[in-house]
Image (spheres, grey):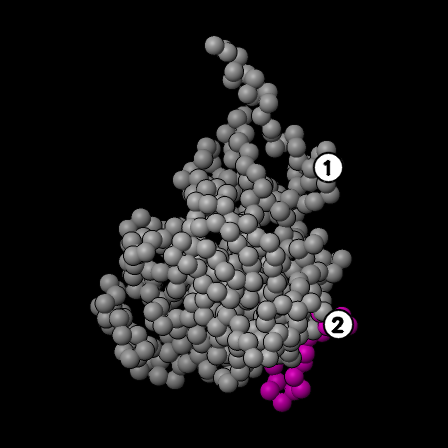
Amino acid sequence: MDYDFKAKLAAERERVEDLFEYEGCKVGRGTYGHVYKAKRKDGKDEKEYALKQIEGTGISMSACREIALLRELKHPNVIALQKVFLSHSDRKVWLLFDYAEHDLWHIIKFHRASKANKKPMQLPRGMVKSLLYQILDGIHYLHANWVLHRDLKPANILVMGEGLERGRVKIADMGFARLFNSPLKPLADLDPVVVTFWYRAPELLLGARHYTKAIDIWAIGCIFAELLTSEPIFHCRQEDIKTSNPFHHDQLDRIFSVMGFPADKDWEDIRKMPEYPTLQKDFRRTTYANSSLIKYMEKHKVKPDSKVFLLLQKLLTMDPTKRITSEQEDFLFLDSAKVIQIPYPKREFLNEDEPEEKTEKVIIHQPDPAAPQQTTAQQAPSQQSSAQTNGTAGATGATAGGGLQHGQDQGPPNKKPRIGPSGASSGTGVLQSEYQHSGSRLGYQSNVQGSTQPQSTMGYSSSSQQSSQYTHQTHGY
C-alpha cells in the first residue's frame, strides 16, 4: 500500500496561485464570491481569464450544481468553464473562465449616463438586435437541453471585448440554473424565490408552482426593453429578498403600471394562481386603465407598428402559455445592417473594502419633443459585412481599444428566421440549427462547429418623463 499517496497527490495538484497572477485585479463581487482578472504566470498564452472564487469554505450545493451544468454545456453564447481548482489550504473553490471585458449592465449604464450628462449616445438598434439574438440563441440551447437559467439580467449577460470572440455574448452565472422535466415538476417547493425582482415574470409573483421556460423569456423581454430605453422597465423598490412569500405588491404594481392590468381573456389561467385572492384584494383594474406597453414605449420613441415593438410585446406577454418561445420565428432578424463601433470603458479593479452592493443614482432628463432627434454620437465609419449564411448571418467584434462592433448581412429575402436559432430540439434534445451540435439531452457532450449572429442598425432615441433613482447589485459569471 502506498502510504505516501496523499502527499504525492498534494504535490502533483495544481494550485491556482502558482498558475495565475490575479492579486489586486478584482473586477467583481457579489453574494457568490469574488471575480478576478487573471493571466498565466508561465506566459504560455497572452489570454485574459476570469477567476471566480466561490464564497465560503468547501463546495456548496449551488457551486456543485453550477459546475455540473457548465461541464456539460457547450455553446458560443454560454460561458465556458475552463477548469476547477480546489485550494486545500483555505478550502476555497476557484472556477476558471475566459475573461469578458463587458456586461450589459455596464453597457446600459454607459448609455444612461450619457443621457444624464445631456450628451446622449443611444445604443444603436443594430447592436441591440445583435445582443438580443445572441441571448436568445444561448437560451434556446439551454432550453433545448432542459435547463432553466432562472436569473437572467443585464449583469449576467457578458460581452467579450478582446480576441477572436469580440462582441460575443456569453450567458453567465448558472448558480440558480436547474434541470427541468417533461412533464413539469414543481420547482417552487425547493426555492420559491428565483430571478432578480425587476426581471421576475408575473406568474412567479403570483406563486406559480409549475413555472416553465417562459420565465426566462420574460426576463429577456425586460432586458430587451432596457437595451432600447437605457432604463429598467419594471424597476421598483426592492423588497425583502429573504422572504419565502412569492407575492410582491410593489413589483406587480410596477408591471401593471407599464403593461396595464391583464384582462381575463388575455390570461385565462390567472384565476388559478395561488396568490390570485391576494391580487384581487390589493389591486383594482381601473387603476391601470390608461396603462399599456404601447404608451410606455412611445415615450421612448419606439413605434407600436415597428418590428422591434412587436417582438417586445411577444416577449412580455402576461400569460406564460402565450409568451413566445426561442423556437418561434420573427421578422426582426431578417434585414441587413452596418458595423457600429463604440469604445466602451473597460472594467475597473475593485478595492478590497468596497461594499458588495453598488448604489447608482441616475437622473434621466426628458428631451424636448420639438428638438431634432439625435442619433448615435461618434460612430466609426460604417462598413458592410461580407459573409452570408442561412438568413441569419453576421459577425461580432470590438475595437482594439475595448469597444464593441456589430454587423450583419442580408439573408435570403423569402426566409423568415426564428426568434432564436432555426430548428427545434428533437425528443432526445439534439439541436438542428445554424449551430451544428452533436449529442443528446444534458448529460452528454455537445460540440459546436460554427456560429453566426445577425445584427442591423437604425436611428433611435429614447426619453423618460421623470427622474429615477435605484440600487442594483451586480453579479456576472
Q: Is residue 381 magenta?
A: yes
The image shows residue 306 at horizontal and vertical percentages of 53, 82
Residue designated by label 1: 44
Residue 388 higher or lower than 35, as above or below: below
The image shows residue 26 at horizontal and vertical percentages of 62, 44
* Amino acid identity at mark 1: Lys
Tell me where the magenta segment starts and ends, as one range.
Answer: 362-385
Decide if residue 114 is on the left or right side of residue 399. left
Nearest to N terminus: mark 2 or mark 1: 1
Image point (50%, 85%), residue name: 305
Residue 209 higher or lower than 422, as above or below: above
Q: Which mark is residue 383?
A: 2
Q: Nearer the viewer, residue 397 or 418?
A: 418
The image shows residue 155 at horizontal and vertical percentages of 54, 57
Q: Quadrant of residue 8?
A: top right
Decide if residue 10 is on the left or right side of residue 346. left
